[in-house]
Amino acid sequence: MHNSWLPIIIRGRIVALALIQAGAPSATGSAARRPYRADRRMSPAAVGNAAELFQLVFRQMETAVLADLRKSDLTHAQRALVELRTVATRLREELNGLVPLFARRSST
């Protein structure tokens, strides 16, 4: 079994690392099946830089998702507040309409 780390590069930046596991090459045709750039290896510094960049991208995405969730929660709360205000206004109007009826009944 051979383990290889494959960088995922977007716009010239390494954004992730992928672990590739492959079985040992067979005795026949192993040279013909050699993957392109199989001899290219990343230096430890490049792996560290890639890991830092990946963590930075991940944190940025996490922050963006949390911001979207908070915005969604705020929007939901605003809608609920508008609905409660509408109900309160309607009840106030109905109560104001009933007060004169009670005043007339008590005076007669």
Image (cartoon, rainbow, N blue to C red):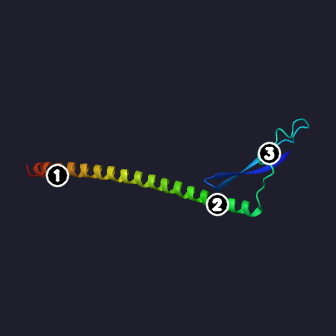
> Pointer 2: what residue?
53
Q: Residue furthest left?
A: 108
Residue 47 appears in which quarter of the rendering?
bottom right
- Helix or strand or loop: what does disc 1 sit on? helix
Q: In the figure, 43 relative to 30: above or below?
A: below
Task: Give the amino acid at mark 2.
Answer: Leu
Task: Give the amino acid at mark 3.
Answer: Gln
> Pointer 3: what residue?
21
Q: In the figure, 29 relative to 83: above or below?
A: above
Determine the CA span between mark 3 and mark 2.
Answer: 24 Å
Front in this rendered view, residue 73 or 90: 73
Left or right: where does residue 65 sit relative to residue 76? right
For disc 3, the neighbor class at 10 Å (few under 14, some 14 to 19, many from 20) is few
Q: In the figure, 46 relative to 18: above or below?
A: below
Give the x, y percent position of residue 5.
76, 52
Label located before the other in sequence (2 or 1)? 2
Left or right: where does residue 49 sit relative to residue 81? right
- Helix or strand or loop: what does disc 2 sit on? helix
> Pointer 1: what residue?
99
Label located before the other in sequence (3 or 1)? 3
Question: In the image, what residue occupies the spot 21% across and 48% down?
Answer: 94
Determine the CA span between mark 2 and mark 1.
Answer: 68 Å
Determine the CA span between mark 3 and mark 1.
Answer: 80 Å
